[in-house]
Each structure stands twice: as C-alpha cells, then as structure tokens.
Image (cartoon, rainbow, N blue to C red):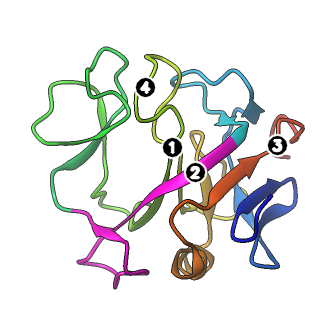
C-alpha cells in the first residue's frame, strides 16, 4: 500500500492515518464479481475520477468534474458503452447520476472493469455517500457525507482503493 491509498477493512476505510466508518456491498467482497451480484470486488482499484453535483455542493477538489442533468452510467452488458458514463436519452439499462436523493452528490470513480469492460463482470464501483450507517450498497463503498468530502479533498488522482480478498464475506 502506498501513502494516499485507501484500504477497506472490516472496521472501516483507512485513509490518511484515520479510520472512517463505511459500508460495502450487500453481497460481501468477492474475487468473482458479476453484474448485479451486490458484491464489492476484491483487488486494487485506481481512483480515475471525481464527480459532483454543482447545484448541491462546491467542488471538493480542483480535478472534480461537475455532473449535469442527463448524465447516466451504463450498467447493461449488451451496451457498447457498458460501464461508461453516457447521456440521456440512452436505450440501454443505466443508472442516473443526478439522483433526487443525495447519494451521488459526490462520487469517486474507480477503474473496476474499465476502460474496456468485459460484459457481465460488473460496472460502476464508486465511493459515494451512504444511505445510513451500516446499510450495505449494491457493490460500492459508502461513507458519511462529511467523511467522503474530507477524503475527496485530500485524495490525489491515481490513488487506489484496496479491497482485500480476505475481507469478511458480508457485513454483520
């Protein structure tokens, strides 16, 4: 692990000498990630982007990119743009990035199954705001809003999210 990396542990996300409470996929951690399995993929995942809602928050870092209405993320393995950000209208299954709730007000994008996605291997492994403490995600890593903002402000492009394969299969 390099300085500036994030390490997922059973007791939280380690970053910058601190442990941040977090949640991860309802399917636990897996070494065989599949689209829709609800699991967080084990491995070393580079942070390749930071997206934010400019109508709700200030840019957390100078390399953050504003989200626009109509920004989507393709999660359909049949789509040639699978596991990429796309624009509405989009004729394949996708996830809205500008949500009515604040879940995606700030997103750290990882390089899971990117840039040349293998169909069905899973899409959109983000770090984002949690719904509430202890509530698992669909495969992403989620944090309290203030913790996510603090991490985003200190994070540098190319940092890695490290998810050990030996993590507990599911959160208790």
Query: Is there CB contact under 8 Å for labels 1 and 2?
Result: yes
Q: Spatial distance from mark 1 to mark 2, Cα to Cα?
A: 5 Å
Query: Is there CB contact under 8 Å for labels 3 and 1?
Result: no
The vertical placement of 113 against 49, above or below, is above
- The structure residue drawn at horizontal position 63% and vertical position 24%, both measured from the top left corner, is 33
- Label 1 Cα neighbours within 10 Å, binned few <14 / some 14-19 / many ≥20: many
* Secondary structure of residue under mark 3: loop
* Secondary structure of residue under mark 4: loop
The quarter of the picture where residue 134 lies is bottom right
Residue 111: give its label: 1
Left-right relation of 169 to 126: right
**Residue pointed to by mark 4:** 117
Residue 46: give its label: 2
- Label 4 Cα neighbours within 10 Å, binned few <14 / some 14-19 / many ≥20: some
* Secondary structure of residue under mark 1: loop
- Residue extent of the magenta highlight: 44-67
- The structure residue drawn at horizontal position 9% and vertical position 37%, both measured from the top left corner, is 89
**Residue pointed to by mark 3:** 164
- The structure residue drawn at horizontal position 15% and vertical position 25%, both measured from the top left corner, is 91
Q: Quick one: label 3 or label 1, which is nearer the N terminus?
A: 1
Q: Spatial distance from mark 4 to mark 3, Cα to Cα?
A: 22 Å
């Amino acid at each position: 692990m390099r300085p500036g990396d994030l390490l997922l542990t059973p007791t939280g996300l380690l970053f910058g000498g601190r442990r941040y409470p977090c949640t991860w996929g309802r399917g636990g951690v897996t070494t065989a990630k599949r689209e829709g399995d609800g699991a967080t993929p084990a491995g070393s995942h580079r942070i390749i982007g930071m997206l934010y809602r400019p109508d709700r928050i200030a840019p957390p870092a100078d390399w953050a990119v504003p989200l626009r209405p109509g920004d989507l993320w393709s999660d359909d393995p049949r789509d040639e743009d699978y596991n990429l950000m796309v624009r509405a209208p989009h004729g394949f299954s996708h996830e809205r990035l500008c949500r009515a709730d604040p879940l995606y007000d700030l997103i750290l994008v990882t390089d899971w199954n990117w840039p040349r996605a293998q169909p069905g291997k899973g899409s959109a492994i983000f770090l984002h705001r949690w719904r509430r403490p202890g509530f698992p995600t669909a495969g992403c890593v989620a944090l309290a809003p203030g913790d996510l903002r603090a991490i985003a402000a200190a994070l540098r492009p190319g940092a890695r999210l490290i998810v050990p394969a030996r993590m507990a299969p599911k959160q208790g």
